[in-house]
Image (tube, grey):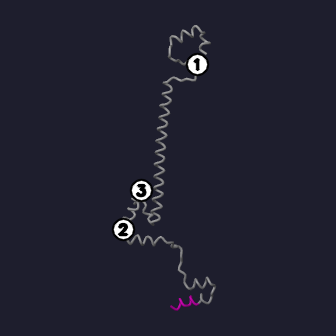
Amino acid sequence: MLKEILGEELYNQVSQKLGNKKIDIVNSGQWIPKSKFDEVIKEKNNYKKQLEEIDTESISKKKQELWELEKELILDKQNLGEFKDFFNASDTSTLEEQIEVFKGILGDKFKENKLDTNYKPDNHKQTDAYAEAKKNKDVGSMIGHKLSNIFK
């Protein structure tokens, strides 16, 4: 292509001057200067570093959230969920050691706490003989209960 532009005589002179050196002649805009290329590479590396930092931060946050959930589950299983703020372990084995120490401190109170987790209705009323008779629509027992209260 260069030969066509320069002509054969000029092309031969240029080739002799250059010797084994090679040159690129570009006018299509496909090549960019090295300084611009270096700048783009530096910018890319900065973005890559920022992305790695964000990923690392995100992963450590997720690990912490998972650990907190696991800790809650372990403490709930041991009936110690309400004491979760007292445990500051960073792994399962340390948490289990802290649970054993905590149980040792609580002693019998822990056993009482374990029994205390059963359901206890708070709106349960004691039924007396009159209420039972009323429920069964037994008028005779209702009157008998009222009369027995009068003669006490």
SS class, disc 2: helix
Q: Amino acid at mark 1?
A: Asn
Q: Alpha carbon of mark 2 to alpha carbon of mark 3: how far?
A: 20 Å
Which residue corresponds to mark 3?
Answer: 91
Give the residue drawn at x 54%, y 12%.
Answer: 15
Foreground tag (3 vs 1):
1
SS class, disc 1: loop
Relative height, residue 33 to residue 112 (above, below): above
Which residue corresponds to mark 1?
Answer: 27
Query: Does the magenta segment cover residue 149?
Result: yes
Earlier-in-chain disc, 1 versus 2: 1
Foreground tag (1 vs 2):
1
Farthest top residue in view: 9
Is residue 104 left or right of 147 when viewed as pictured?
left
Q: Amino acid at mark 3?
A: Asp
Q: Alpha carbon of mark 1 to alpha carbon of mark 2: how far?
A: 84 Å
**Picture disc at residue 104:** 2
Q: Residues within 10 Å of mark 1 (few under 14, many from 20)?
A: few
Give the residue drawn at x 37%, y 70%.
Answer: 107
Earlier-in-chain disc, 3 versus 1: 1
> From the image, which quarter does the N terminus lie in?
top right
Relative height, residue 134 to residue 82 (above, below): below
Q: Start and end of the magenta stretch?
A: 144-152
Which of the 4 image quadrants contains residue 147? Answer: bottom right
